[in-house]
């Protein structure tokens, strides 16, 4: 007897491999799957604007990557001793304006380099709610703890999301006809608006993603991470202590589903061979001296060198 309701995974007309440049943008769920891709040496750029929850801010970031040369001093705002960008998450803020700009533009240029040869853009929406800075009339990625009275809050409709994305997707695929957009909806519930409010917000995202997939069937697809968590992982052992955010066990479960349908079999073989190396790195001896440490280092170096010789095309510089 089956003890879970298993979500049927769709078929995809493409697969990702270690030659695929991948840009991942969106919620913290994006960072979790992106981190695993990075560990397995895929050429991936993850959230170059920091964690981004709503579709409008994700699109602002995508437009900046494809249209903007660099951020300039006039793009920053000064608040509470920090230089901030309304396009970016708080980790890009800095007391020194030039330092803030350097951090911002370093990630922007990294994203630009990835997008030049990207096969896939993986976009994870977390909420349909947006905050608009009243003075600048701009949807913000993050409010940076600025008083709430300086923002207006509203929930996007499915049609508004579709109208935002359709021109951008059309423009990009007109010159990049093989580029793939993979849309997902974050399984992390936004409990601020309550259970019903969260479901309404997720419904907007699900409807918008479905319409875009239907409008661009050759270039847009949907991966059901939200449905997998809601229907297959209903046990609280898959959640963190706040009972809202999914934990590492859930992330690995979804990764297995993702890799099963979206990763090429040759890359799956590479992943399998990289696993012993990653496990060794994760279990470094506590003391970096003595015979046991020297033995561990010798085994580690031999294993990595053998894999580097076998797969020289991988991005080994990313292996810490």
Image (cartoon, rainbow, N blue to C red):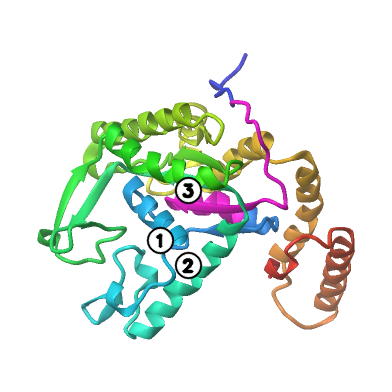
Is 108 rendered above or below residue 274?
Answer: below
Q: Is residue 17 magenta?
A: yes
Q: Are marks 2 and 3 in contact (CB under 8 Å)?
A: no
Residue 184 is left or right of residue 218, and the answer is left
Residue 266 is left or right of residue 32, and the answer is right
Is 36 rendered above or below residue 289?
Answer: above
- Residue name at image x 87 percent, y 73 percent: 298
Q: CA distance from mark 2 to mark 1?
A: 8 Å
The circle drawn on residue 85 is: none
The circle drawn on residue 108 is: 2
Camera-near label (2 vs 1) is 1
- Residue name at image x 76 percent, y 43 percent: 268
Residue 71 is left or right of residue 275, and the answer is left
The circle drawn on residue 64 is: 1
- For mark 3, what is the residue? 29
Q: Are marks 2 and 1 in contact (CB under 8 Å)?
A: yes
Question: In this view of the protein, can residue 274 be seen by the observer?
Answer: yes
Crowding near the residue tagged with mark 2, few <14, some 14–19, many ≥20 C-alpha atoms within 10 Å: many
Q: Which corner quadrant of the image does residue 42 belong to?
A: bottom right
Q: Where is residue 320 drawn, in percent x and y?
A: 68, 70
Magenta segment, which residues? 10-36
Q: Where is residue 151 drawn, in percent x and y?
A: 15, 57
Instruction: Tell which of 314 and 72 is nearer to you.
Output: 72
Crowding near the residue tagged with mark 3, few <14, some 14–19, many ≥20 C-alpha atoms within 10 Å: many
């Amino acid at each position: 007897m089956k003890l879970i309701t298993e979500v049927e995974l769709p078929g995809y007309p493409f697969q990702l491999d270690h030659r695929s440049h991948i840009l991942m943008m969106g919620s913290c769920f994006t960072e979790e799957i992106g981190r695993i891709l990075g560990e397995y040496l895929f050429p991936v750029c993850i959230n170059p604007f920091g964690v981004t929850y709503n579709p409008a801010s994700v699109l602002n970031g995508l437009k900046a990557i494809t249209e903007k040369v660099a951020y300039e001093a006039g793009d920053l705002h000064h608040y509470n001793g920090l230089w901030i960008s309304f396009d970016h998450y708080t980790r890009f803020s800095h007391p020194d304006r030039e330092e803030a700009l350097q951090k911002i533009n370093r990630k922007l240029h990294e994203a630009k380099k990835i997008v030049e040869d990207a096969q896939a853009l993986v976009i994870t929406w977390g909420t349909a709610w947006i905050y608009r800075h009243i003075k600048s009339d701009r949807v913000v990625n993050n409010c940076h703890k600025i008083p709430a009275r300086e923002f207006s809050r509203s929930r996007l409709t499915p049609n508004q999301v579709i109208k935002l994305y359709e021109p951008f997707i059309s423009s990009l695929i007109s010159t990049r006809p093989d580029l793939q957009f993979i849309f997902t909806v974050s399984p992390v519930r936004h409990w601020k608006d309550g259970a019903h409010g969260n479901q309404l917000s997720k419904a907007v995202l699900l409807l918008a993603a479905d319409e875009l997939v239907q409008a661009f069937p050759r270039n847009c697809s949907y991966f059901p991470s939200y449905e997998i968590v809601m229907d297959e992982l209903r046990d609280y052992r898959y959640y963190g202590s706040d009972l809202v955010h999914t934990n590492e066990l859930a992330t690995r479960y979804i990764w297995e589903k993702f890799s099963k349908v979206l990763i090429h079999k040759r890359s799956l073989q590479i992943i399998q061979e990289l696993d012993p190396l990653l496990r060794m790195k994760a279990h470094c001896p506590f003391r970096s001296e003595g015979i046991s440490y020297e033995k561990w280092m010798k085994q580690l170096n031999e294993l990595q060198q053998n894999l580097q010789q076998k797969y020289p095309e991988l991005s080994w510089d990313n292996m810490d």
